[in-house]
């Protein structure tokens, strides 16, 4: 399973996973998980990078953390209700469990026209 994940990644993405072993473990854990259902609507959304929590939302309450102007995220990890659903690092998407949710949003927009 790990070999299959690594096989499709760029050197830059692999380097990010090697630098952050805790995040590598989370990516490996999330890799075999199914995409979220089309009608999924999270109550809690959290966004992390190598410094920690960057932003989030609980219900209708949003929050964010100030970072220095020159802050660069080496990766971003999105959690919905405590589950890793998107991990981007090294310039590419490594985990994407939002594929069906994104497709559903496209259909909703086309219905509104």
Image (cartoon, rainbow, N blue to C red):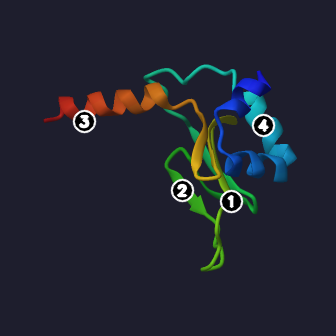
Residue at point 62% right, 78% down?
70
Give the label, 1 or 3, closer to the camera.
1
Farthest-out residue, right: 21
| N-terminal-most mark, 1 or 3 | 1
In the rendered image, residue 33, in percent from the top left (x then y), is placed at 66, 21
Residue assigned mark 4: 26
Give the label, 4 or 3, closer to the camera.
4
Reply above or below: 60 against 112: below
The CA span between labels 1 and 3 is 32 Å
The CA span between labels 2 and 1 is 23 Å
In the rendered image, residue 10, in percent from the top left (x then y), is placed at 65, 44
Residue 28, located in which quarter of the rendered image?
top right
Which one is nearer the viewer's eye here, 6 or 45?
A: 6
Which label number is shown at residue 74?
1
Q: Is residue 105 left or right of residue 32?
A: left
| N-terminal-most mark, 2 or 4 | 4
Which one is nearer the viewer's eye here, 9 or 99?
A: 9
Residue assigned mark 2: 62
Residue assigned mark 3: 109
């Amino acid at each position: 399973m790990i070999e299959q994940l690594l096989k499709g990644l760029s050197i830059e993405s692999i380097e990010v996973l090697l630098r952050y072993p805790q995040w590598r473990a989370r990516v490996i854990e999330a890799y075999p998980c199914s995409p979220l259902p089309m009608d999924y609507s999270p109550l809690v959304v959290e966004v992390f990078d190598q410094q920690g929590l960057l932003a989030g939302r609980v219900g209708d309450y949003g929050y964010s953390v100030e970072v220095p102007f020159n802050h660069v995220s080496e990766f971003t990890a999105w959690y919905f209700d405590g589950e890793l659903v998107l991990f981007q690092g090294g310039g590419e998407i490594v985990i994407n469990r939002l594929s069906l949710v994104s497709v559903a949003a496209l259909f909703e927009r086309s219905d509104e026209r």
